[in-house]
Image (cartoon, grey):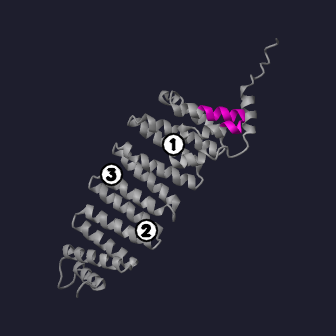
Amino acid sequence: MGSDPEKLITKADKLTKLSFTRWSSDWRSATVLYEQAANGFRVAKSYEKAKEAFEKASKGQEMLSSPWDAAKHMESAATMAKELGNWKEVADFYRRASELYNECGRAQPASDALGKGARALEDGAPDEAVQLYIEACDILEEDGKEQMAFDLYRDATRVYLKLEKYEDAAGILLRLALAADKCNATHSQCKAYLSAIIVYLYAHDFRQAEKCYNDCCQVEVFLNSDQGRCAGKFLSAYAEGDVEDIKRVAQSSTVSNLDHTIIKIARKLPTGDVSAFKNEATQDNEEPLDEDDLT
């Protein structure tokens, strides 16, 4: 028979089916054959058949109570699905791999599988990609490993910005700040706060940027940080309607130390007419008329 993957699959399938002459399935032998067939199909670039063989090999490892090996085969099936451009299967297979790693009590590989899935989906299905990034963060947070999730939060932010979902991008940055606070990573926390404020300014939502700044200033480490002072300068420049000052703050070293994605949008500020903000700020600062005051 040699190593013809088609014949290997046929033989493996027979070993798993019950018949008059076979009263029990031989999953151990079958799984070895499925693995050989999957690798044969992959080398031949027969991705659809390789994907199906890896799925069968994964099922075989589950039947043999080996979720770790089953997860590895699921990831290989996902790689084949990516080659085929089948984005739904890519997401499904990586999620299944993650569940299998979780069965082994391994949060880090479970999160990594979702992260790999997200990266594989970024171009073909960005909305699904960002969902997988968030699920990967959830797993690490539940396991008390917030620090390990920082890069995943940044990746999710990047995809949201690409999708022009600015509210969601800012929300993820605030969640990153909260995770950083839990593990006393104050520098990362302050950078995340400033980044969220910059995202709101880029979305030309001065009100939300101002509200976010006021909320973040309740946190003393931010209030007294370079990032807090930088955010304050941004808002003052917007309130003054001073385009040159906004550009100057965007070029500051504090902004240059943020993530590349945020630096890129900061350097494009202001994104619209800021004179309207100046009028708003002036109105806000005027004292309301007291009808009872006759002086």
Q: Quadrant of the N terminus?
A: bottom left
- How far apart, in angstroms, are the residues tagged by discs 2 and 3? 22 Å
Residue 19, compared with residue 203, is above or below; it is: below
Of the numbered discs in the image, which one, if any, rests on residue 108?
A: 3
**Residue occupying the point 18% across, 82% down:** 22
Using the numbered discs, state the Cα–Cα distance from disc 1 to disc 3 in whole angstroms.
Answer: 26 Å
Does the segment drawn in magenta span residue 101? no
Q: Secondary structure at mark 1?
A: loop
Residue at screen point 38% across, 43% down = 147
Q: Earlier in the sequence, mark 2 or mark 3?
A: 2
Which residue occupies the extreme right position in the image? 294
Left or right: 85 in relation to 49: right
What span is in magenta? Answer: 232-245
Is the stretch drawn in magenta largely helix, strand or loop? helix
Which circle marks residue 80 in the picture? none
Near mark 3 (Cα within 10 A), the count class, few <14, some 14-19 or many ≥20, is: some
